[in-house]
Image: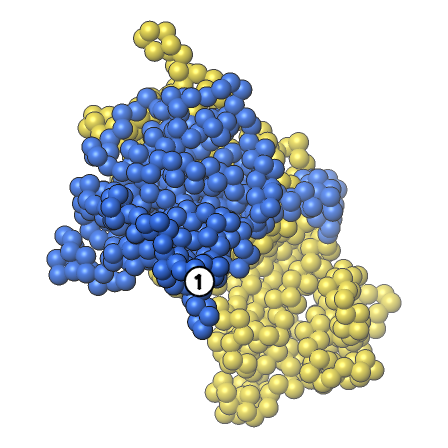
Chain colours: A yellow, B blue
Amino acid sequence: MTSQVSSPAEQADGADEAVVGEQRRPAGEKEVRRLDRVIIRFAGDSGDGMQLTGDRFTSETASFGNDLSTLPNFPAEIRAPAGTLPGVSSFQLHFADHDILTPGDAPNVLVAMNPAALKANLADVPRGAEIIVNTDEFAKRAMAKVGYDTSPLEDGSLSAYNVHPVPLTTLTIEALKEFGLSRKEAERSKNMFALGLLSWMYHRPTEGTEKFLRSKFAKKPAIAEANVAAFRAGWNFGETTEDFAVSYEVAPATQAFPAGTYRNISGNLALSYGLIAAAQQADLPLYLGSYPITPASDILHELSRHKNFGVRTFQAEDEIAGIGAALGAAFGGSLAVTTTSGPGVALKSEAIGLAVSLELPLLVVDIQRGGPSTGLPTKTEQADLLQAMYGRNGEAPVPVVAPKTPADCFDAALDAARIALAYRTPVFLLSDGYLANGSEPWRVPEVDELPDLRVQFATGPNHALADGTEVFWPYKRDPKTLARPWAVPGTPGLEHRIGGIEKQDGTGNISYDPANHDFMVRTRQAKIDGVEVPDLAVDDPDGARTLVLGWGSTYGPITAAVRRLRAAGEPIAQAHLRHINPFPKNLGDILARYDKVVVPEMNLGQLATLIRAKYLVDAHSYNQVNGMPFKAEQLATALKEAIHA
Amino acid sequence: MPDAHANELLQLVPKAEAKQSMKDFKSDQEVRWCPGCGDYAVLAAVQGFMPELGLAKENIVFVSGIGCSSRFPYYMNTYGMHSIHGRAPAIATGLASSRRDLSVWVVTGDGDALSIGGNHLIHALRRNVNLKILLFNNRIYGLTKGQYSPTSEVGKITKSTPMGSLDAPFNPVSLAIGAEASFVARTVDSDRKHLTEVLRQAAEHPGTALVEIYQNCNIFNDGAFEVLKDKDQAEEAVIRLEHGQQIRFGADRAKGVVRDAATGDLTVVPVTPENEADILVHDAHQASPTTAFALSRLADPDTLHHTPIGVFRSVDRPVYDTLMSDQLDTAIEQNGKGDLGALLAGKDTWTVVG
C-alpha cells in the first residue's frame, strides 16, 4: 500500500519530507504505518453533514497536536436537490507532523457518501489514493442522476484507486437498531459512522467528539447516544474489518510550533476575537452594524454572543443602515465596525466616503467572495481590492489591511483597529471566503502581549483665536498623524457640527472655497499616505532574481509553492503584503531589486495594476478566478515558468 | 400613563447646570435658507423650546440627511452631523443605541425621509429607537430646484414632470402608523405655539417620535399649505387633535368626526344635538393604531381639507436602546463580565512545550 506515501510531486510544502518507516502497534493485530502528512476530503450531499464531520475530524486532529489547514467547500443553496452534482458539499483537511501552509492540492483519501460526491470529486483525487464509498447510495437511479450508466464500483473505472466499498447506511442503521429510531433518523448518523471509521484509520482521539455530540444534542439524549453509538460503530468497523488492514499515525507536529498554548481557529472566528480584543485594548465599547451576507455573517453571529464584553450588535435593515449605525456609534465614541462582502461594500460606498470626510474611526470588514453582482456567494476571490481602494466618489483614500491566514485574521483586525483609531479614518479589512471558513492552529496570545490601542478623546479647546479666545476646532490636526480630534458628544464646550460637505481646514465649517478644497483633498490623502505600516520583509535565502509578491489569503499556497521551488533548486524570493494602502515604504526599493516580479492573485491582476501604476514595474500577473484557492503545485509550475521565461 | 417612562429615559441625559436661553442654542453659523423659507420658523421654534427641555446642550445631537432642512444641525449650537441622503435615521440609531445619555434628534425632509431614506425611516419607527424625528414636509424637492416629491399631489407640474406627476403621494402620518410608530404627530411651521407643544410632547416620549411639520417652500411650492394657514379657510380645513377632547372643528365647532357604524371608518359630519354624544373623543394613547390611522386618512391629499394636526398617537412600547442595553446587563449577569484571556483560549487547547 503506497497510496498514502507522499511523493515529492504531491507535497504541498516541505522540501524533504519522507514517510518514516513502518511500525507496528505492539498490542494491535493490524499493521500501523506512520505518515508525515495526510489530506482527507469528506464529500456528500448538502444534507449529509459533511461540514460537521470535517469540523469534528479537525478538532480531533487539532487536539492531537498536528499542524493542519482546512478547506470547506459548499454550495450556496441550503439544500440543493439531493443526490445532484450541484448539491455536493465537501470538507478537505490537511494535517501533518510538521508545519504546513495549505489545505493540500489533492486528497490522499476521499470519503464519498453518494455517487454525486464521487463524481464531483474524483478528478481531484490522484491515482493510487484511497476512496471510501458508501455503497448503499449506489442504486441505479442515484447513479443515473449524475450520469453513471454503469456502476463505477463495478465497471473497473476506479481500478487505479484503492477503493473501500462500505455499506455505511446499512451499517449505521444496524448499529442503531436498539435505539428505536425511525430508519430516516438512524440514517442521519451515517456521517458519524464515517467519522468513527476515519478516526480509527488515523488514530484520532475520540473523547472530544463524544463530548461534543452529548452537548450538541443535550436536549435530545437519545439522538446524542445514537450518534455516539454510530461513531463508535464506525471505529469498531475499522478495527475488525479485513478490508481496512492498515491504520496510520501522523505524529504531533511538535517541531512546527513554538512553545505555547494552541487552539484551532477559523478566519471569521479569529477576526471576531480580534475585534473584541481591539475594543478591550482601546478601552472602547465595540459596536457592530451589519446586514447578513455570506460569507461574513458568522462574524455577526459570533459577536452577538459576547454581549458580556459590552459588545453591541445591530442587525440593520440593509447594508447602508449597517454602516450608518456603525458610523453613528463611532461619532459617539465606540470602536465601530461593519461587516459585509463585496455586494455590501458596493452599497456602503457612499457611507464610507462620508466616514472619510467626517474622519471618524470605522472598520469595514469585507469577506470577499466571487463576483461580480451576486457572483459565487460561498466561493473565495480577491477581486474587491480595487473596489476597496477606489470604489467611492471623489478622492476618498482608505487604508487597506489584508490578513494572510485564518489565524492571522486576529492580528489583522487589531492592526486595522490601530490605524482607524490613530488616524480617525475608515479602514478596509479584506479577508475572503477561504480565510473565513478555513481553519488552522493558532497560538493563543496572552492578553498582556496585545498592543495598547487607547486613544485620547478631546477634552477642551485646542485653538486660540487672534483675540486670545480659546476655541475648539474639530478639524485642527495632530501635526504628526494629521488626525483630527475625536470629540464625542457629552463633552462640554466642544459642541461642533461635522458633515459630508467640504469643510474649512481647522474650523470644520462649510466651505466652498476652491483653494481650501484643494488643500483638504491633499491633506486627507497625505494623512492616509502617512499611516505608519511596518516595512515589508523579503524571504530570499538564495539571492534570487525573481520575486513573488502576494497579498491576503494566497500566502499559504504561494509559500508552499516557494518551498517546492527552492527544494528543487530554483531560487525565488517571496514577499507578502498586509498593507496595500499605504504600501510599505520600502516596497519600491524591494521591487527594484529583482529582475522579475510575479503577482499571483485570485482576480485578474488588481494588485499588479496598483504595483505597475505606482512603481512603474513590469509586474507579471498570474491569475485564477475559479472560486477556489490556488493549488501549490500549480503555482510552483507557474512560478518556475516565470523564472525561466 | 403611556408616557410614564418618559422622565425615566430623559433622566439618563444630564441636565444643564445653568438656566439656558434661546441664544445658547444658536451656532455662530449664518443661516443660509432662502429668505421667507418655512425652515426659519421651525429653527426658531426648536431653539426657543430647547431651554425649556433643560438638557445639557453637549448631550444633544442633531443628525440630518441631505436637503434644505438637513442644513439644520449647522445652526444648532449642539453636537451635530450633516450626513448623506436618507441615512440620518440609521446613523442616529447607532448613536442613540450606543449612547443612552444623549438626546438624539433627526432632521429630515419629505424626499430625504420618504424617498431615498424610506427604508431607514420605517425601520427606526418599528424598532422604536429613542429618536425624535422632525420631518419637514414641503411636498417638493427644494435643494435640487423643484422636482416633485413623494408627498406631492398627483398631477404636480414640475421641471421633471412637465405633464404632471403620475404617482400617488405618501401620507407620512399614515406611513408612520403603519410602520408601528409609537408617537406620531403633525404640526405646521407657522403655528409656533402648536409646533412647540408638539415638540414638547415628542421630547418627552420614550422611543421614536415622528413629527411631520408642514413647511412652506416659498420658492418652489409656495402656498402649499395656505389652506391650513389662511385664517378664513383654516377653520374649516384644520382638525386640531387634543387628547381627551372631542374631535370637532370649524366655525362654532360645528363639525365633528364620528365612526361609521357600518364600516368602522371615520367621517366628518355636522354636529347636531342628536349626534353630539357620538362625536369621537381623541385618545392618542389607545393601544390599537386603527383609529389613529383612520384619522390620518381624513385629509384630502389634493385640497388638504380636513387635515388633522396634533398628536395622532402616543403609546408606550419597549424602546430599542433600552432593550439592547438590558441584554448587555443580562449577559454580564449570566456569564460574568467578559474575560478576554478565557475567550481567546476557548475550550479545546493543547500545549506545545518548548
Residue position marked by numbered label 1 in the rendering: B275
Q: Position of residue A308 (x, y in %)?
A: 67, 43
For this rendering, which residue is in front, A199 or A13? Answer: A199
Res B33 quadrant in image: top left
Q: Is residue A251 visible?
A: yes
Which residue: 74% across, 47% down?
B334
Q: Is residue A365 visible?
A: no
Q: Position of residue A601 (x, y in %)?
A: 39, 53
For this rendering, which residue is in front, A24 or B5? Answer: B5
Which residue: 39% across, 33% down?
B46
**Left or right: where does residue A377 sit relative to residue A257?**
left
Q: Position of residue A24 (x, y in %)?
A: 80, 66
Q: Answer above or below: position of A569 versus A589.
A: below
Res A177 quadrant in image: bottom right
Q: Secondary structure at mark 1?
A: loop
For this rendering, which residue is in front, A161 or B77? Answer: B77
Query: Where does the N terminus of chain A fall, quadrant-wise?
Result: bottom right
Which residue: 53% across, 71% down?
A78
**Left or right: where does residue B110 sit relative to residue B1?**
left
Which chain contains the residue that carries disc 1?
B
**Left or right: where does residue B228 sit relative to residue B158?**
right
Q: Residue furthest front?
A: B273
Q: Answer above or below: position of B344 versus A341.
A: above
**Left or right: where does residue B203 sit relative to residue A448?**
left
